[in-house]
Structure formats: C-alpha cells, structure tokens
Image (spheres, coloured by chain):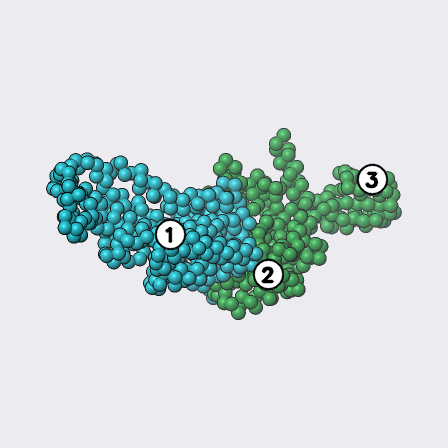
C-alpha cells in the first residue's frame, strides 16, 4: 500500500508517458478463456445453432448417400475407385459448406456486440483487445469445428468404402481445420472494420468467393499473358503408313513454333484456392497409377502440380498406341518423348502459408480496431 | 489486488494522488459536432459529484472519456491517479463504469454476467462467484440470480448494471443515469448505496436528469452546457445561499397582502399550484435563517401558513437559473 505522489505532466508531453504495447497485445490464457467461454455459452444456448448443426448433419449425410448411390460399383467396376471418388466429393462438399457457414460464425462477432452494447462492457475490463479478439476467434473456430466433427462419420464411411488409409483423412481434417479457422479470422476482422453485421458478412463472403472462385478465374484469364510463341520439338508422323500391311507411318523430330503456356509463372494463383489446398494436401499417387486416378481430389492435385512444372518442350504428336504388324504380332509403341511430369514440389504449403498470413493479418486488424480509448468511431455507432 | 489508498487531502486530488477524478480543458469532437468543448471537473474521494446538464451537453461523452473508452482531443484527465488514455489498464482497474444504455448478454443469467465480468477483471473463479453472490444480494436480485438476463425488467437490468460496475470494487465510480427506469424503492436503495460507497472513500460521479434525486445524494455538482463546464459548486453550501421558497396559506390573499406589507416581494405564483385552492407563492430568501424568521413573523402576524419549503431542489434551482442566464446570453 502506498500513496503515489506524481507531478502530472501535460498529456503526452513527457517521453516517459506513452502507451505500452502489452496493454493491447498481451495474451493470457485466463483472459482468452473468459471471452471464449462467454461466446460459446451464448452460442450453445441459441436454438438456431442447434438447428443449423442438425441441418448440416442431414445435408452432408444426404449428399454422401446420393453420391454413393449414383456412382455405383458398375460405374467404376472397382469399389476402391468408387470409395475414393465418394471421399473426394464429400471432402469438397464439406469444405464448400464450411466456407458458407464459417463466415456466419464470426462476421458479426464484433460489430454485433457493438450494436448490442456489450462490446464496451468487455473493453472496460482488464481484458486486452488481443484477448477479446483471440477469445472470439477461438469460439468461432470451435463452432466451425463442431460442423466439421458432424461430417466425420460420413468421411469415415467413404474412407472405409475406398479402403483408404487413415492418413488422407487426418491430413484433410487438419487442412480443413486450418482453412476454416482462417475464414473465421477474416470474418472477425471484417466485423471489426464494418459497422453493420450485414456489411461484414457480405465482405467475408466476397473474400471467400474471391479465394475459391476468383483465383481459378484469374489463373485462366492470365493464361494469354504468360503464353508466348516458342519453338518446341515435336515427334510427328512423316508420310502415310500402310496400316493394312502392318506398317505404321514413320515418325521423326521436327521443330515447330507455337504458343506455349507458362503456367509455372501463375500456378501460385491456384495455391490460394482452398479446394486446391485441400486436394494437394495428400501424397501424389504412385507413378504407375498417376494418370489413372479418377477421384476429384487427385485430379485437382495432378492439375495444379502439372501447372507448376510448366510447359514441356518436347511433344509427341505421333503416338498411335500399340498395333499389329504383318505377322499379327502386337507391337508396343515406344515414344521417345517423356510423359509430362507433375511437379514433385508441394503446392499446399504455399497456400496454407498464405492463409496463415491472412489469419494473422486479420487478427492484427481486429485487435487494432478494438484498442481503447478510441480515436474514431465507426460511422453510425455508439461506443456504449 | 494492491490498491493505493484513497487520499483524503483534497489538495492532492488535483494531482496524482491515487484517487479522485480530475479533468482540465477536455475537448472532444465527433466530426463537426463538438460534443465536449471545454470541461473542467474535479471529483474528490469520499464525495458524490453530480454531473448536471441538458440532453446533448456532453455528459455521456465526458463519462466515456473518463472510463477510458474515448480519446479526448485535448486536455488533461486523471482517474484514480492515472491518465486513462495512457495508463488505461491501471485506470480501468480502479474505475467502475455504468453506461446509460447498455446491452447485456441476454442468454446469460444475472449471476453469470457478474462472474464473467469478475473473470474479465482477473478475479479467480471462487472470488468471482463470492463477489457475484454478494452483489446480487446488494442490488436485491438474489431471487432472479439464475434467470436469463433477458427476462429482467428495465429497472432490474439497471440494478444488474450497477452491480456489474462494482464487481472489482473500484475506487472511482462513473454512473451514467443510474436512476432511470428504477422504481421508488430502488431509487432509495441506490441513494443509500451510493452514500455508503462514498463513505468508504470512493469517488463517485453521477450524471442524471432527475435533479431531485441528485440533490439527495450529491455533495458537489458540475454543470455542463454545450459541452462546457459552466459552474462547479458544492450542494451542501446551498443552505447559506439566496434561493426560492414556496409558501402556502389557508388564505392566499391575506398571505400576499402580508408579504407585501413585510417587504417580501412575491416573485411569482407557483405555476404548478396556480389552479389549486391554495396556490403557493414563491419568494426569494437569503438563507435558512431568513426562512425561519419569515415563518415566525408570518405566524405571529396571524397568517394561517400551511407550509414553507424550498421550491425545488438546490440543483434544480441552480440548473434553471443557469438555463435562464444562458437564455439571456442568447438574446
């Protein structure tokens, strides 16, 4: 107990008196937990939330059944291929729905509280802005994960049908978890910036649409910009062969000038796509099965890896496959041109890294907007 | 939690003595609107200070600045010895703020609201639970403690808000319109509670429109108008001041005649009792002694006096006279 007697300098005049960064950025588990518990408590008590979870379970279950029914065994002639396809489709569907649900979980977390007059109540306590933001983020994230957990039974079902190992399921879940967390963080930042909850929801949806759709569109639109005329070596037929006599046309190398798409310069656009990140977060199929996979995850993975490795400067225009020679023997075709190799370099770490930057940036934006005392108020809002 | 003791030497309240509120030359604009133009205010530990002013005079903005939620554009602010804009944490640890309109977490119970705020003030769970129970009893919400907050009436929410401001046992209390929505019983409770907190050495700043309410609990008053401090005064000193008294008698005509004869000009007939059988007349008297003398003389002279009392509270009179002065200024 002491009585401090300090001369009062004019505000801000003394170099000793300035704000401390800890007052805004310090994080304690106690503080974060207090905010997260408050948020979750309110969420759990709303019936809307229970209905949403139930609807989610029914919809994901319905889609799984539908996909399983449509792609019956005859379609693939192979139960494993079917299982893989169902697994891939369900993963994509869960991601798609997750991207729709996650923004609603966080996009009104801050401006909604502002409108209800409860934000200032928290700010006026000893909680730091960072604790309020992280607590709200954790609560929204946990809610998003509840939706993810509700889809796990169907993912496991697909996994069992496809006789897949557990590894892809775990990696998918890990990536989905992180992606949904980042979307929640983006929603939180918008809800700190926009004054109305509807505004921040729209902005978050635009951001999600931008990442999921615009990246793919941009990748397509930039194709002409990274396409140039270049010379390539082509293995092509010369003259006509005598097929009846078992003589295929001869092939030889020639040089052609033609447009070459340098997708290795724009593949990173695809890396920012959540569907690509999820699809790529699994090991590449074995080389002998590389071009035989039909499930959507592997197809997208192969596409983006091939885009990353860029154009090949040797092409086989000759390839006619196996044929029977004059004696009726089957002659295999041997191409001197190498098959295009998908890049071994993984794409998903770039995408995930970018997302984690987005997430961290969003948290920083939200914390800065929650610092008190505030200099400016969002238009049309009161502090209290 | 270590706290500095509220120092009771008032001279130190202007500087940083770990207690009280002082604001000098505080300004704050929202765009083109100068909400607070120039406010000087001192609220001392152990006293209740009333913040009085018409709607839009900057009371709420000033309280937000003192609570550390808004930055002032200029001026010096010290709350419990700390500048809320720079040492917000220290100031907030010692400040209880009860906003004028506040939302509450509707799905939480009254008890959970208080334990949440306690946790947000870094209190341990058991301390928070004990404090919540204590405060719920204090504001008579014990039987509604486990009801969700949205079933509470406006007055009950207001009491919950007061309890919320008290959770961390702050040295400084900022109460923005605490009496609005309260029933008479709760108003009395509020007054008793505020006086008790002041007696414990806390600094209390109360804004209200209900001036008679403030009259009964405030020691000092600060008048705001158009975002400026127009007067700071002590309420207790009013007994020794010239003010208006209302006088009624069974025979109003006789009363008026006697007053004229005694050289006590009637200022006006009290507009509120104009149509009554015994309209009150308003006279201005120098102090309480003058009032006692008037009553004695009237009774001696055989005027059937029924009542003699100050016309309106001290604050109301002071407020109205300031309004009047402002009106004249305008003209």
Q: Which residue is drawn at 46% across and 43% down?
A: A202
Q: Can residue A161 be seen from the camera position used here? A: yes
Task: Return the residue at label 2.
Answer: B109
- Say yes or no: labels 1 and 2 on the same chain: no
Q: Look at the numbered discs 1 and 3 and tell me whether their residues touch, using CB distance below 8 Å.
A: no
Among all residues in the image, which is located at the extreme top? B331
**B273 or A84, nearer to the observer:** A84
| Horizontal and vertical percent position of residue B184 | 71, 55
- Position in image of residue A188 (x %, y %): 44, 50
Residue at the spot x=51%, y=67% of the render?
B125
Q: Do labels 1 and 3 share a chain?
A: no
Q: Left or right: B172 with respect to B235?
A: left
On the image, the x and y values in percent for residue A337 come to 16, 47
Q: Which of A177 and B301 is in front in this view?
A: A177
Q: Mark 2 lies on which chain?
A: B
Q: In the drawing, does residue A88 fall left or right of residue B212?
A: left
Asked if one can make out residue A369 in the rendered structure from this viewpoint, the answer is no
Task: Indicate the secondary structure of the residue bearing disc 1.
Answer: helix
Which chain letter goes with mark 1?
A
Q: Which residue, given by chain and number where applicable, does mark 1 sit on?
A: A359
Look at the image and give the colour of chain B. green
Q: Distance between the residues labelled 3 and 2?
A: 50 Å
Name which of mark 3 and mark 2 comes first in the sequence.
Answer: 2
The 10 Å Cα crowd at callout 1, few under 14, some 14 to 19, many 20 or more, is: many
* Residue in the foreground of this view, choosing between A14 and A228: A228
Identify by letter the chain in cyan. A
């Amino acid at each position: 107990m002491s009585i401090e007697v300090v001369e009062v300098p004019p505000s801000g005049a003394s170099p000793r008196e300035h704000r401390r960064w800890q007052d805004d950025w310090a994080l304690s588990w106690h503080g974060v937990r207090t905010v997260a518990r408050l948020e979750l408590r309110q969420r759990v008590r709303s019936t809307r939330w229970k209905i949403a979870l139930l609807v989610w379970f029914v919809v994901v279950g319905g889609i799984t059944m539908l996909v399983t029914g449509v792609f019956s065994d005859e379609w693939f002639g192979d139960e494993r291929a079917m299982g893989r396809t169902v697994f891939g489709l369900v993963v994509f569907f869960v991601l798609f729905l997750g991207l729709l649900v996650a923004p609603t979980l966080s996009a009104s977390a801050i401006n909604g509280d502002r409108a209800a007059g409860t934000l200032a109540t928290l700010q006026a306590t000893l909680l730091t802005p960072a604790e309020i933001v992280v607590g709200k983020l954790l609560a929204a994230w946990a809610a998003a994960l509840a939706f993810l957990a509700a889809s796990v039974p169907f993912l496991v079902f697909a996994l069992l049908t496809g006789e897949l190992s557990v590894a892809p399921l775990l990696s998918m879940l890990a990536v989905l978890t992180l992606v949904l967390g980042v979307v929640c963080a983006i929603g939180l930042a918008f809800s700190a910036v926009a004054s109305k909850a509807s505004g921040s929801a729209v902005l978050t949806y635009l951001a999600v649409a931008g990442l999921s759709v615009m990246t793919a569109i941009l990748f397509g639109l930039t194709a002409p910009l990274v396409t140039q005329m270049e010379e390539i070596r082509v293995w092509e037929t010369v003259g006509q062969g005598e097929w009846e006599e078992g003589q295929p046309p001869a092939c030889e190398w020639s040089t052609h000038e033609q447009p070459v798409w340098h997708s290795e310069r724009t593949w990173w656009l695809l890396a920012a796509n959540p569907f690509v990140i999820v699809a790529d977060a699994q090991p590449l199929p074995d080389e002998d099965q590389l071009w035989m996979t039909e499930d959507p995850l592997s197809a997208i993975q192969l596409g983006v890896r091939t885009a990353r490795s860029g154009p090949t400067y040797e092409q086989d225009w000759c390839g006619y496959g196996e044929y029977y020679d004059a004696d009726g023997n089957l002659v295999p075709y041997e191409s001197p041109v190498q098959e295009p190799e998908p890049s071994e370099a993984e794409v998903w770490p770039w995408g995930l890294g970018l997302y984690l930057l987005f997430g961290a940036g969003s948290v920083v934006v939200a914390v800065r907007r929650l610092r008190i005392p505030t200099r400016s108020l969002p238009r049309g809002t009161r502090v209290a | 939690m270590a706290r500095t003791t509220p120092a009771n030497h008032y001279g130190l309240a202007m500087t940083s003595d770990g207690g009280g509120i002082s604001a000098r030359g505080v300004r704050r604009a929202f765009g083109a609107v100068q909400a607070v133009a120039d406010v000087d205010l001192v609220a001392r530990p152990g006293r209740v200070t009333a913040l009085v002013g018409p709607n839009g005079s900057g009371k709420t903005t000033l309280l937000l600045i003192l609570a550390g939620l808004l930055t002032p554009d200029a001026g010096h602010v010290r709350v419990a010895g700390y500048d809320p804009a720079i040492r917000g944490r220290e100031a907030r640890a010692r400040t209880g703020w009860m906003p004028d309109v506040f939302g509450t977490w509707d799905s939480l119970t009254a008890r959970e609201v208080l334990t949440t705020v306690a946790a947000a003030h870094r209190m341990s769970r058991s301390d928070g639970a004990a404090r919540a129970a204590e405060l719920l009893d204090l504001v008579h919400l014990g039987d509604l403690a486990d009801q969700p907050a949205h079933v509470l009436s406006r007055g009950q929410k207001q009491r919950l808000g007061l309890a919320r401001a008290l959770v961390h046992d702050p040295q400084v209390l900022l109460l923005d319109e605490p009496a609005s929505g309260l029933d008479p019983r709760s108003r009395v409770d509020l007054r008793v509670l505020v006086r008790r907190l002041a007696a414990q050495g806390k600094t209390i700043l109360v804004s209200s429109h209900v001036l008679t309410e403030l009259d009964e609990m405030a020691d000092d008053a600060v008048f705001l108008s158009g975002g400026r401090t127009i007067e700071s005064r002590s309420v207790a000193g009013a007994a020794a001041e010239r003010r208006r008294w209302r006088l009624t008698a069974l025979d109003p005509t006789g009363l008026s005649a006697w007053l004229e004869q005694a050289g006590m000009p009637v200022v006006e007939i009290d507009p509120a009792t104009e149509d009554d059988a015994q309209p009150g007349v308003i006279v201005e008297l120098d102090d309480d002694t003058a009032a006692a003398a008037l009553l004695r003389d009237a009774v001696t002279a055989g005027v059937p006096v029924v009542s003699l009392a100050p016309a309106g509270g001290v604050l109301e009179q002071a407020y109205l006279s300031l309004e009047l002065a402002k009106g004249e200024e305008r003209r």
